């Protein structure tokens, strides 16, 4: 059992969720309420990681983050090391790759709030911020929660992107999914089996907890 | 404290409407769906901005497109009751009302919210969520929430359309009672003339974004010009008359340009000039002067025009000695009696009332 790899995976998933939570709320809300000409294009861009093979996506990220790219150069000048093959690079890739999982369910959550309820909040004197905190988030909450759980579980299991952008550096970019692949390659089926079962258990527990929590809150609301 | 509104726009619907509502007054905006009445409410609340508009309350300008003033909705002290009530579904009735009390010190909110809920007869239901309340109860919570803001203007957007008839009539009475507590200008948006007549002081009838009739409810109800919008059921006309004398059997004789009429009751000394309100559906038409009929009031007149409505109904305009009255008939009767402009006939009036512009016209018993 590669505890370092498991810990790294959990950290990566944690950071991804933390960064994507505000993005999920703001973008989901924006796309749910606003109508603009390029909306279709923006929604398509957000969904793109869902249909693109991780290797293709990883390849472009590798090019974009590379030492010769503007982003890569900026990162090196600012933080003193390169972005690819580091944990930070993995987080950035993971954030981008999880955009559809983070934004779509949140957007559906905000879309489910009737327009008149939002207008009533404004006409009750609630500022946009207070309306978000007191009316919209409590109502769109199941959508946002689903988004975060999907992001977390999906990050734990991501393989292709991690391998492309991060390589397989123990303690830095070697996540549990990579470690399982590594063990299988080394004919160490026992270790691979234990780690696979652990990942399965964590994923199942996360999703079950979410459903249970949603149902409980759903009952409280109705 | 008055509310002044002006709005002009060409899209999404053409709009050119202006009106003023005095403090404590209830103005009904009456019209079909799509006439622009709800758009006016949204303009006042700041939920929509027409090309050219001005909204001022109590000397404070909320919106003035010419001066580029446009307060955000949450900065306008407005109370609004939506057609769907739009209660916050995750909050109790009490929390819904308290949510609109951002301007009140937090220690005082609950006391005030409870007082408002008892004002709208919801004592004991404070802890219920909207889903556990009936339509009528939800509407009351919405009214309490709108009042919780201590609004400078109260806006009611078809607030009775989602409840059954019995509940609606109870809510009418409650709103009428509540009005004595309200000092702010109130606007009621409705498509129902009867609702407007029962609740409002004045009416503005809107059709395709324009005002086609305005005045006290009594004046508008008897404005033949508002016929198309209001439908046959509620229209009528008014006829000038002079009170002459009380007769031995208690009936009061009045003279009109078309001849004498009798009413069971008429307050006023002989010589007093009054206007008689006659609803179109209280008028029957006969080609010959009818005999052997219980109705006392029969006026001779000439058909001056006909307005076809939806369905089989026709409204006839009659000239009776210089005054105009309206009669509501079926198209079949019009054909059978060969009625057409210029034809002379007799109007049998089943009921009429003396109108007073300062108060509501009370319906007189049928003779």
Image (tube, coloured by chain):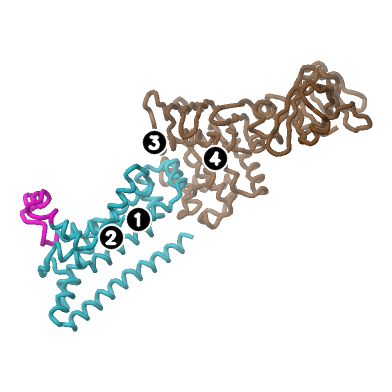
Chain colours: A cyan, B brown
> What residue sits 90% from the left and 23% below the top?
B247
Image mark count: 4
Q: Tell me which label, 2 or 1, sits earlier in the chain.
A: 2
Do marks 1 and 3 both belong to one polypeptide chain? no
Question: Which segment did they paint magenta?
Answer: A63-88
Where residue A51 is drawn, which disc sits there?
Answer: 2
A87 in magenta: yes
Do marks 1 and 4 both belong to one polypeptide chain? no
In the picture, measured across the screen, residue A97 lies left or right of residue B299, that is left
Spatial separation of the CA atoms under disc 3 and disc 4? 20 Å
Number of residues whose C-alpha sits closer than 10 Å to that of mark 4, classed few (under 14), some (14–19) or many (20 or more): many
- Which residue occupies the foreground of this view, B44 or A194? A194
Spatial separation of the CA atoms under disc 1 and disc 4? 31 Å
Query: Disc 2: which chain?
Result: A
Residue linked to disc 1: A106
Residue linked to disc 4: B157
């Amino acid at each position: 059992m590669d505890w370092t790899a498991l810990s790294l995976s959990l950290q990566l998933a944690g950071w991804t969720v933390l960064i994507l939570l505000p993005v999920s709320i703001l973008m989901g809300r924006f796309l749910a309420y606003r109508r603009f000409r390029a909306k279709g294009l923006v929604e398509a861009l957000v969904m793109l990681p869902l249909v693109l093979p991780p290797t293709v996506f990883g390849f472009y990220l590798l090019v974009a983050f590379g030492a010769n790219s503007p982003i890569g150069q900026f990162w090196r000048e600012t933080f003193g090391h390169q972005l690819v093959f580091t944990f930070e690079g993995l987080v950035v890739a993971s954030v981008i790759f999880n955009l559809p999982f983070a934004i779509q369910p949140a957007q559906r959550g905000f879309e489910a709030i009737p327009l008149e309820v939002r207008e009533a909040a404004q006409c009750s004197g609630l500022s946009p911020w207070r309306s978000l905190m007191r009316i919209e988030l409590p109502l769109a909450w199941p959508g946002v929660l689903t988004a975060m759980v999907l992001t977390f579980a999906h990050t734990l299991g991501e393989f292709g992107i991690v391998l492309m952008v991060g390589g397989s550096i123990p303690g830095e970019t070697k996540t549990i999914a990579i470690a399982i692949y590594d063990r299988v390659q080394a004919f160490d089926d026992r270790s691979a089996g234990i780690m696979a079962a652990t990942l399965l258990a964590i994923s199942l527990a996360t999703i079950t907890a979410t459903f249970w929590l949603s149902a409980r809150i759903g009952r409280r609301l109705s | 404290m008055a509310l002044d509104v002006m709005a002009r726009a060409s899209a999404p619907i053409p709009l050119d409407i202006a009106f003023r509502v005095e403090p404590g007054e209830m103005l009904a905006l009456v019209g079909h769906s799509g006439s622009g009445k709800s758009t006016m409410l949204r303009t006042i609340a700041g939920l929509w901005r027409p090309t050219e508009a001005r909204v001022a309350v109590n000397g404070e300008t909320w919106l003035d497109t010419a001066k580029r003033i446009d307060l955000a909705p949450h900065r306008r002290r407005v109370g609004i009751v939506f057609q769907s009530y739009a209660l916050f579904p995750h909050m109790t009735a009490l929390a819904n009302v308290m949510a609109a009390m951002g301007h009140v010190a937090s220690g005082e909110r609950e006391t005030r919210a409870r007082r408002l809920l008892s004002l709208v007869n919801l004592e004991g239901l404070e802890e219920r969520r909207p889903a556990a309340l009936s339509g009528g109860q939800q509407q009351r919570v919405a009214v309490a929430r709108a009042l919780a803001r201590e609004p400078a203007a109260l806006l009611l957007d078809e607030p009775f359309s989602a409840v059954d008839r019995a509940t609606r009539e109870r809510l009418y009475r409650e709103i009428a009672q509540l009005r004595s507590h309200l000092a702010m200008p109130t606007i009621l948006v409705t498509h129902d003339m009867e609702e407007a007549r029962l609740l409002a002081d004045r009416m503005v009838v809107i059709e395709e974004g324009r005002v086609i009739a305005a005045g006290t409810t009594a004046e508008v109800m008897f404005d033949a010009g508002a016929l198309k919008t209001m439908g046959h059921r509620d229209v009528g006309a008014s006829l000038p008359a002079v009170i002459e004398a009380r007769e031995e059997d208690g009936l009061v004789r009045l003279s009109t340009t078309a001849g004498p009429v009798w009413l069971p009751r008429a307050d006023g000394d002989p010589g007093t000039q009054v206007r008689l309100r006659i609803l179109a559906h209280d008028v029957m038409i006969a080609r010959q002067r009818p005999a052997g009929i219980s109705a006392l009031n029969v006026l001779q007149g000439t058909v001056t025009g006909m307005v076809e409505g939806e369905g089989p109904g026709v409204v006839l305009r009659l000239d009776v000695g210089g005054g105009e009255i309206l009669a509501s008939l079926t198209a079949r009767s019009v054909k059978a009696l060969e009625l057409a402009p210029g034809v002379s006939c007799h109007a049998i009036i089943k009921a009429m009332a003396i109108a007073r512009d300062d108060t509501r016209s009370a319906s007189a018993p049928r003779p």
